[in-house]
Image (tube, rainbow, N blue to C red):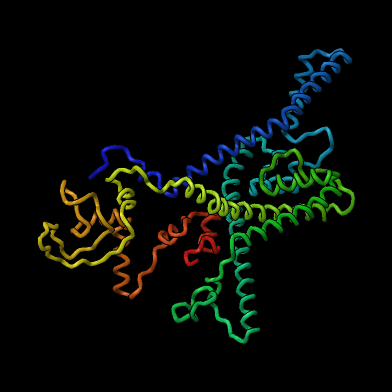
Amino acid sequence: MACRRGCCCGVVNEDNARFLMLAVLIVLYLLCGAAVFSALEQPKELQANEQWAQRFERFTQKHSLNRTDLETFLRFYEEANIAGIRVDTLRPRWDFTGAFYFVGTVVSTIGFGMTTPTTVSGKVFLIFYGLIGCASTILFFNLFLERIITVLAFVLKSCHDLKRRRQGVMPHDGPRGAPPPGLRDRGRDSLAGWKPSVYYVMLILCVAAVVISCCASAMYSAVEGWGYLDSLYFCFVAFSTIGFGDMVSSQRVTYDGNQTAYRLGNFLFILMGVCCIYSLFNVISIVIKQQTLNWLLRKLDIFSYRGCCHCCPAGIAKRLPPRRNAVMPSGNGHGHSRARRTVSIETDALNESETDGGRRMSGEMISIRDFLAANKVNLDLMQKQLSEAATNGIPRPSVSNQNRQNGFSGGVGALGIMNNMLAETSVDR
């Protein structure tokens, strides 16, 4: 029977509930952040505005300048500032090295903002150049994360093989406790069963990011003349691709010492820092998803479907006990007017109620539609698995079903790469 009222059971599934919960948490996080930064920075802003107004007034009175003319001149300077012209002497913006620095900030999505195209042709070219460049760089970051996980898996396997050699047992290319690979496994990767924990990956990336940031901050403090805390602030802003542009490295015309070595070091530190911080953010997102969102949804009992309408598949599935798929023989009752039972698949218990009112007992025949709705099985998928079972003897598990079992959808990008590569996202954990 179709739903007579709008029902949210088919809409608020596990993925949608997780998405909505994350959206609510992000909004709350933004509100808290806005409150904190407003309390910290607004007094300084008011003080700066008052100080500027006093300086402006004193300057106009001292030099007998018209206030409107001075404001017009300052607007001209703001336009020149956008074009890269500063009071202090800085390196050229659009020579080859300056342009290379600019395109590096574009494709890495840092975007400091100290250099921007001003011509129409430059802006149009930036749109297409950034589209391809940003996509390629994000792919590079994802593959970097994949290499990190692969290296950790190799280390785990090597440590286990070394331990087995010390015990006098010859290692094989499978995970601990798995049988030796057969003919069908020869083409598989030898690291298939070695999945590092997401917490180990997060710890290693965090340590790497801290070490790179500390070393880079020491270099910036010595060369740029910044304070060490300001240098750490710049490293986080740059490595996380936030790129405010209030502090930008390698912008002077000349530097004391080996200028080429400093510019090369600056490039390498930013490259390694962005790779580590980007990978760390993606690994932390897995922890947030598993430890925070799933925990909150379990606490809130989102998937209990209490009060769900009887006609929804989710409501049917909730009311049914664990599936037994038992084949019940037909039987004749003595002295009782029981419902007649035929050989059928017992689907989980009472479907809608007892026998009267057009409702079925648990042993009665049910339609294939009700069976699929109650067991959440796709007909095409079931036919495919039955066909593979008849042909090969063992049906291949569906990737989507495996991902659903552990709470991780397939995903794209970094989530797709980390799916089934970590111990917490593996289907065989």
Residue 338 lies in quadrant? bottom left
Residue 285 visible to an observer of this rendering: yes
Work out whether 173 lies above or below 222.
below
User: Which residue occupies 44% across, 49% down?
Assistant: 15
Instruction: Please state, as top left, top right, bottom left or bottom right, where the N terminus lies in the image.
Output: top left
Q: Nearer the viewer, residue 3 or 403?
A: 3
Q: Is 257 displayed left or right of 48 in the figure?
A: right
User: Which residue occupies 62% across, 36% down?
Assistant: 32
Horizontal and vertical percent for residue 132?
57, 49
Q: Residue furthest front?
A: 335
Residue 144 lies in quadrant? bottom right
Q: Residue furthest bottom?
A: 168
Tag count: 0
Residue 136 visible to an observer of this rendering: no
Horizontal and vertical percent for residue 8?
36, 41
Work out whether 164 lies above or below 73.
below
Q: Is 332 displayed left or right of 301 in the figure?
A: left
Q: Nearer the viewer, residue 205 or 374?
A: 374
Horizontal and vertical percent for residue 82?
72, 33
Horizontal and vertical percent for residue 114?
72, 38
User: Which residue occupies 54% across, 74% down?
Assistant: 175
Q: Is 353 displayed left or right of 67 in the figure?
A: left
Q: Nearer the viewer, residue 417 or 265?
A: 417
